[in-house]
Image (cartoon, rainbow, N blue to C red):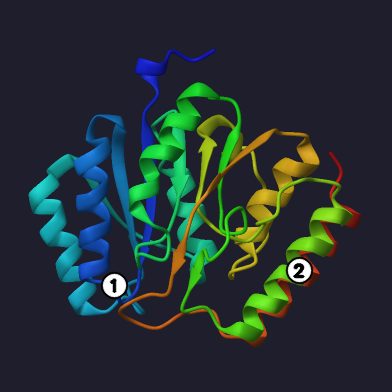
Amino acid sequence: MLNRNKQKFDIFLPVIDETFSLEETINIIEKHCSKDISQYFIVLSKTKSKQKSKNISYKLKLKYRDKIKIIYQKQSFIGGAIKIAIQNIKASHFILMASDLETNPNDVKKLITNSKNNPNKIIVANRWLEKNSFKGYNILKLFLNKLFQFFFSKLYSVSLSDLTFAYRVYPSKLIKRFILKENRHPILLETVLIPIKLGINFIEIPSKWNSRKEGNTNNSFFRNFAYILTGFRIFFFRKK
C-alpha cells in the first residue's frame, strides 16, 4: 500500500468562462488541503476560453506559482481537456472536478481523506446519497438523470448510483491505462464505466450540487442523450 505521506494529488480544472468560481475553487482547496496538492491543471482552449478567464488563470499562476500549471488543450471539447490533463499527471492520484463550483471544493478534503485510506480505489462524489442534494437543477433533467442512473447501475450490476457526476479521485496509474474514445461530455461516463468493466472498486461519498453562478453550460439538454449510446457501447463492446 502506498505510504499516506507520499500520496499527492493533481487536480483537473477545465476553464471556458469561469473567473471568480475558478478562483474560489482553488482558494478553498488551498485553505484545507494545500499540503496534499501537487498541481492544479488549469486547462484552457485557445479559441473558446474567454479572455477574462485566461486573465484570472494567469493571476492565480502568479499567486500560487509552480502549483498552477496552465495547459492549452490540443483536441476539442471536454474530452480533449481531460485527455491532455491525464498526459500531464505526475502525482500519485488525480482529481477530476469542475471550476464552476458545481463540484463543491469543500468536499475535496473528504475525497482526499478517503483516497488516503483506500489508495487503490476510485473515490466518487455522489449527489444521490442524501436528500435535497440538487440546487437549481432542471426538474425534467433531474427525473431523467435518476432513470438513467437506475437503469445503467442495474445493467452493469453495480451499487453506484451516480455514474455521471464528474467529481472523482483516481489512482494515477489506473486512469493512465484508460483508452478514452469520447470527446464530448459522455467521456464523464466513460471514465467510470471503464473501471467498472475492469473490476476496480469504488467508494462513494455524499456531495451536494449547486448550479453555476457564472457562465453557461457547455452541454446542451439534447446532447445528454449521447450518454445512453456510450453506456451501451462500453457494455457490449468493451471487454475486461
What SS does tag 1 mark?
Answer: loop
User: How many residues crowd mark 1 within 10 Å: few (<14), some (14–19), many (20+)?
Assistant: many
Picture residue at 59% right of the left edge, 25% below the top: 120
Q: Position of residue 20 (x, y in %)?
A: 20, 69
Q: Is residue 104 above or below residue 93?
A: below
- Nearest the eye: 172 or 97: 97
- Nearest the eye: 111 or 143: 143
Q: Label 2 amino acid?
A: Phe
Residue ID for mark 1: 18
Residue ID for mark 2: 148
Q: Is residue 118 left or right of residue 152?
A: left
Picture residue at 36% right of the left edge, 29% below the top: 8
Q: Is residue 135 above or below residue 7?
A: below
Q: Quadrant of the C terminus?
A: top right
Note whether residue 180 is visible.
Answer: no
Q: How far, Cα to Cα, is label 1 from label 2?
A: 29 Å
Q: Is residue 50 left or right of residue 201?
A: left
Picture residue at 19% right of the left edge, 51% below the top: 27
* Quarter holding residue 36: top left
